[in-house]
Image (cartoon, rainbow, N blue to C red):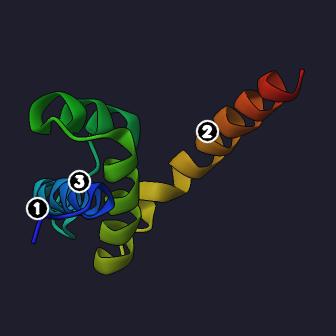
Amino acid sequence: MAKSRNQELYEKAEEERQRCREWLLPFVRDSQPKFLTKAELRDAAVRELKVSKNSFDFEWIEVIEQTGRLSHSAILCASEAETKAHTFRRAIC
């Protein structure tokens, strides 16, 4: 039986997230210092792994929660909130 378009998209997204997870884990392990921002890692992942920003962002949250490396996300939360607020303001104006 042929897969539906939705099933194909789901499987592609799941495969992207898996590649992101495997790629990200070494960067956020306890023994690794934080030397790249989330944005820098996302840009590299999109370029090198050919994944969507959405897949990266989804796995970023999963990896941070899995490893407990909240220090990797604490600084970024404020800047991401500002970016989202700016985008929202631009959208409603």
User: Viewed as shown, does residue 83 lie left or right of 30?
Assistant: right
Q: Could you tell me residue 3's position as x and y percent? A: 17, 64
Q: Which mark is residue 90?
A: none
Mark 2 residue type: Ser
User: Viewed as shown, does residue 61 lie left or right of 13?
Assistant: right
Image quarter in which the C terminus is found: top right
Identified at 9% across, 72% down, the residue is 1
Residue where numbered disc 3 is placed: 33
Residue where numbered disc 1 is placed: 22
Q: Could you tell me residue 49's position as x and y percent? A: 12, 39
Q: Residue furthest front?
A: 1
In front: 75, or 20?
A: 20
Mark 1 residue type: Glu
Alpha carbon of mark 2 to alpha carbon of mark 3: how far? 20 Å
Mark 3 residue type: Pro
Q: Residues within 10 Å of mark 3 (few under 14, many from 20)?
A: few
Mark 2 and mark 3 lie on one chain; the one further toward the N terminus is 3
